[in-house]
Every structure is written in structure tokens, then in C-alpha cells.
């Protein structure tokens, strides 16, 4: 006999491009009792309600009175106000990344959730990427990491620098993979099509000796999301866009093989994980945490840590020689 999870009464705040998919998935997820959504745009709300057959609530308060959990998918500058309204109502929250646009705001969200004993999850969806899930069993003390996240220009997200818009995905991933304190951050970046930094490169050095080189751009011709990881046992090449990757593992006793080519000392391990929409996995993990069945995967504290590193990158860009050379 199949045991179904207790349904969680859940809603969504913000029905833009990403909020639309939150609503679409929560309507179908086993264990989600989707109540409805709120969007302050008087044209967007009825459109989404009709398109998805979902209930649009007339106010945030009206929605909060009916749910026990909420996903917050509003523009980043509104995360703190909306998130605090949700938490102050005693409701568990999943807030899209970045957790907030300021560190004090993020700290306030984390503190409020802790004081109220509520789940606060941050929408760092790359944690649920198929390639990352497939590599996880083989990860062992990453020493050097390279990430590339390149995207064509689009107006969405340009209310913040590319560091908060795109790079923060990889900052969170790197922090989770290395699990060490950050020792030093060096970075450069320039604004090209917006008043904010549109392309950035950061070098993050950790206390344990690991180094990460992270590149993000929203002015590229092609879309790329790659992660390379070097560790004592071998090398990973992950394509986050395709959700697949490779692990080239050093053979046991390779020093005594007398090899003349690298192919003779490494073995290829194909990386496999079940196919699943990362956002669906993220929402399911949130509902499990709300039910008390599992820990929150990406905690408010982790979101705060990624945001703090993003601000260190932004500060490093501001003080770089490239910044002082700008007209």
C-alpha cells in the first residue's frame, strides 16, 4: 500500500516568469495542497490564474491566512519585506535566490525564522542539478574549481549586478562543495549594457587551501553553465545546462604503471542520476522540511553565507585596478 505524504497547504507570492513555474509544479507535486497565489500586478494575476487554472488571491494577507507554507518569487529588492510578512505570520518560507539584496536584510530573515521556529529555505536550485547530484558520491576534498556561467543579455534581473543575478548560483555551489572558511577574494568586473556590473571574474581562496575561479556574464552570445572540479582522486567536468558530466578517476597504484600518457593512469566514470526537474526537486525538499521529515537542504544561513561572499566579490571589484581605470 502506497503511503502518501501529508498534504501541505502551500501558496506562491509572485507570478512572474519563475513564479509561474512554482505554481505549475506545486499544482502537481504529491504532498502539496496548492491553495493559490498572489501577484500585485493587476494584469499578470488574472492571466496566470486562467493559464494554470489557479486561484489568484486579492491580497498577500488573504493568501497568508489560508496556507502553512509559501514560496516567495518576487524581485530581489522585495524579498525582505515579503519574507518578513510571511515569517511574522508564522508561515514556513522558501525564498528565491539571492536571499535578499542586503546583508542586514538577509540576517533579519534568518533571525526571524530561527526565533519563530520556522523553515527558511533559499532557492539555490543548482544544488538539485542532475550533474551535481550525479557527482556527489565521488566528491572528495575538492582543491581547485572553475565555473563558467554565461548568458545572453535580457532585461530580467538587471536591477542587480550579475554577481547577485547569476554568479551567486556558483558561489553557493562552491561554498557547499569546499566547506571551508573564505580566506581571500579577488575580482574584476565591468558594466557593459546596464549601470551594474554585467561580466565578472572572481578568485576565491579558502582557509583549507582550495581555490575557486568563478566567471559570470550576462552579455554572451551563447548560454553556458560549466563546473570543473579537481581533487586528489581525479577530475570532474560537469555541464550544468545539460545535467550531465564525467569523472576521470586516477587508477589505484597509478604511480607504478610506468605510463607515458594520461589516458593510461585514469579511468572514465560516467555520471548518472535520475532525470528530474531541479525546481520540482527543490519544492519537494521544502515540503519535506515543512512536514518535519527532513532537514532544510539550502538553509537561510547558507543563503546568507552565499550573499556575504557575493558582497565580498562586489567590494573586490570596486577596489580593483580595473574599476579605478573606468572613465
Image (tube, rainbow, N blue to C red):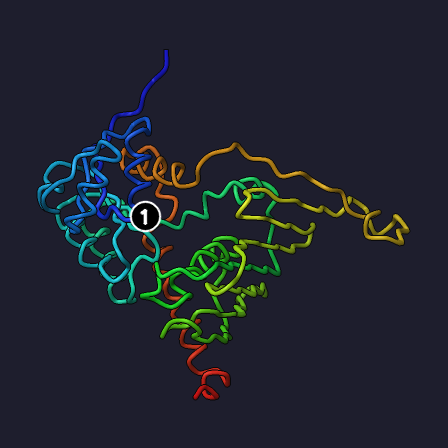
Residue at 49% from the left image edge and 43% from the top image edge: 129
Residue at 24% from the left image edge and 63% from the top image edge: 105
Quarter residue 131 falls in: top right
Residue at 37% from the left image edge and 11% from the top image edge: 1
| Image position of 149 (left or right of 261) | left
Quarter residue 317 falls in: bottom left
Q: How many marks?
A: 1
Residue nearest the observer in this picture, 282 or 54: 54
Q: Position of residue 250 (x, y in %)?
A: 75, 48
Q: Position of residue 257 (x, y in %)?
A: 88, 48
Q: Position of residue 80 (x, y in %)?
A: 22, 59
Question: In terms of secondary structure, where does tag 1 sit?
Answer: helix
Q: Residue tagged by mark 1?
A: 17
Residue at 34% from the left image edge and 38% from the top image edge: 283
Q: Position of residue 222 (x, y in %)?
A: 54, 57
| Image position of 244 (left or right of 294) | right
Residue nearest the observer in this picture, 163 or 305: 163
Residue furthest top in the image = 1
Task: Identify the image quadrant of the C terminus.
Answer: bottom left
Amino acid at each position: 500500500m502506497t503511503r502518501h505524504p501529508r498534504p501541505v497547504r502551500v501558496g506562491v507570492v509572485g507570478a512572474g516568469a519563475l513564479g509561474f513555474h512554482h505554481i505549475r509544479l506545486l499544482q502537481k507535486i504529491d504532498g502539496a495542497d496548492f491553495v493559490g497565489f498572489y501577484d500585485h500586478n493587476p494584469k499578470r494575476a488574472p492571466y496566470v490564474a486562467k493559464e494554470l487554472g489557479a486561484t489568484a488571491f486579492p491580497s498577500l494577507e488573504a493568501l497568508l491566512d489560508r496556507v502553512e507554507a509559501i514560496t516567495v518569487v518576487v524581485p530581489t529588492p522585495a524579498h525582505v519585506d515579503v519574507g518578513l510578512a510571511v515569517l511574522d505570520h508564522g508561515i514556513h518560507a522558501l525564498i528565491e535566490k539571492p536571499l535578499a539584496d542586503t546583508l542586514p536584510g538577509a540576517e533579519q530573515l534568518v533571525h526571524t525564522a530561527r526565533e519563530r521556529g520556522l523553515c527558511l529555505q533559499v532557492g539555490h536550485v543548482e544544488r538539485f542539478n542532475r550533474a551535481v547530484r550525479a557527482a556527489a558520491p565521488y566528491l572528495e576534498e575538492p582543491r581547485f574549481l572553475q565555473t563558467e556561467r554565461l548568458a545572453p543579455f535580457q532585461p530580467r534581473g538587471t536591477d542587480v549586478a550579475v554577481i547577485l543575478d547569476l554568479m551567486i548560483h556558483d558561489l553557493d555551489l562552491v561554498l557547499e562543495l569546499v566547506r571551508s572558511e573564505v580566506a581571500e577574494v579577488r575580482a574584476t568586473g565591468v558594466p557593459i549594457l546596464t549601470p551594474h556590473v554585467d561580466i565578472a571574474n572572481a578568485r576565491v581562496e579558502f582557509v583549507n587551501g582550495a581555490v575557486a575561479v568563478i566567471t559570470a556574464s550576462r552579455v554572451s552570445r551563447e548560454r553556458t553553465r560549466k563546473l570543473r572540479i579537481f581533487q586528489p582522486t581525479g577530475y570532474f567536468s560537469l555541464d550544468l545546462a545539460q545535467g550531465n558530466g564525467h569523472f576521470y578517476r586516477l587508477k589505484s597504484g597509478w604511480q607504478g604503471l610506468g605510463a607515458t600518457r594520461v589516458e593510461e593512469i585514469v579511468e572514465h566514470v560516467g555520471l548518472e542520476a535520475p532525470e528530474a526537474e531541479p525546481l520540482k526537486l527543490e519544492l519537494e525538499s521544502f515540503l519535506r522540511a515543512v512536514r518535519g521529515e527532513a532537514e532544510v537542504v539550502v538553509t537561510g544561513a547558507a543563503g546568507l553565507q552565499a550573499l556575504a561572499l557575493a558582497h565580498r566579490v562586489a567590494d573586490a571589484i570596486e577596489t580593483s585596478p580595473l574599476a579605478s581605470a573606468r572613465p
